[in-house]
Image (cartoon, rainbow, N blue to C red):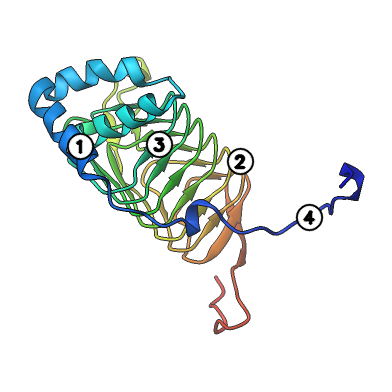
């Protein structure tokens, strides 16, 4: 069909959201356990550099196995694309069916907590400050999104701001929420279940469940509503 004949808007089925998560093979699980026993966490982190950026089958499998071996816990079906990085992977609790996009970076902290629920999709080039983070199940995080979890106190004023203490504030993204491309979630924010954050939004305040927000700073736009849902309360 010629390009000019294609419809300007098409609706097709979701891919990641509808895919089934299958149990990892006994071979993968055994290899992950053996590599952890042989290399230890430090050795596996060094080894990760050999497979981090490749696009081949072996690179993909080895990224998955190293994440599984080092993370505090990890479910089945993890997929880690090329160039994806991390810090303090040992603090991550990863659910089943999680996708981590190319060149994304998830930064934990040695004494922090990073929880990523089942069926979460993290797009390419996402940066996540995961020092106190909870992402619940079936969340989509668009390409280029930034989730920030800390900021400097900026006190006292007689020293550079970068020398002042950091405040780490928990970020929680509720189940079924969707974060648009290049959005920024600021420290301490809770995104409610089923909420939509528009592309490029800067979210400085909590977002109500099943609401739609957009803009800089993000503001309430409307409630999500399906024909078979009861009327949702207004703000």
| Above or below, 76 relative to 105 | below
Return the residue at label 4: 9
Q: CA distance from mark 1 to mark 3?
A: 17 Å
**Which mark lies nearer to you, 3 or 4?**
4
Q: At x 44% / y 41%, what residue is drawn?
A: 186
Q: Secondary structure at mark 4?
A: loop
**Which mark lies nearer to you, 2 or 1?**
1
Return the residue at label 3: 148
Query: Counting residues from the N terminus, which is met first, the one under dot 3 or under dot 4?
Result: 4
Q: CA distance from mark 4 to mark 1?
A: 42 Å
Q: CA distance from mark 3 to mark 4?
A: 34 Å
Return the residue at label 1: 91
The answer, for residue 214, to whether it is visible in the render is yes
Q: Secondary structure at mark 2?
A: loop
Instruction: Categorize mark 3 by other alpha carbons within 10 Å: few (<14), some (14-19), many (20+).
Output: many
| Above or below, 29 relative to 42 | below
Residue 184: x and y in percent read 51, 39
Between 63 and 213, the one lying in front of the other is 63
Q: CA distance from mark 4 to mark 2?
A: 22 Å
Q: How many marks?
A: 4
Of the 4 image quadrants, the one containing the C terminus is bottom right
Residue 45: x and y in percent read 23, 20
Q: Secondary structure at mark 3?
A: loop
Query: Counting residues from the N terminus, which is met first, the one under dot 4 or under dot 2?
Result: 4
Please state if 126 lies on the left or on the right of 224 as rendered.
left
């Amino acid at each position: 069909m010629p390009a000019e004949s294609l419809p300007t808007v098409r609706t097709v089925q979701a891919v990641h959201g509808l895919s089934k998560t299958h149990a990892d093979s006994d071979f993968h699980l055994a290899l992950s356990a053996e590599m952890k026993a042989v290399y230890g966490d430090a050795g596996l982190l060094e080894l990760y550099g050999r497979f981090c950026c490749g696009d081949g089958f072996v690179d993909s499998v080895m990224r998955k196995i190293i994440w599984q071996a080092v993370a505090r816990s990890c479910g089945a079906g993890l997929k880690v694309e090329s160039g994806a990085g991390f810090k303090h992977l040992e603090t991550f609790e990863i659910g089943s069916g999680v996708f981590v996009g190319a060149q994304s970076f998830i930064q934990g902290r040695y004494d922090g907590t990073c929880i990523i629920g089942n069926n979460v999709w993290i797009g390419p080039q996402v940066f996540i400050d995961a020092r106190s983070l909870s992402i619940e199940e079936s969340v989509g995080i668009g390409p280029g999104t930034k989730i920030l979890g800390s900021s400097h106190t900026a006190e006292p004023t007689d020293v550079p701001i970068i020398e002042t203490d950091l405040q780490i504030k928990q970020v929680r993204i509720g189940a079924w929420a969707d974060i648009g491309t290049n959005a920024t979630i600021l420290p301490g924010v809770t995104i409610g279940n089923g909420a939509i954050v528009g592309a490029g939004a800067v979210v400085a305040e909590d977002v109500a469940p099943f609401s739609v927000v957009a803009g800089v700073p993000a503001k309430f736009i409307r409630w999500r509503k399906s024909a078979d849902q009861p009327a949702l309360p207004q703000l």
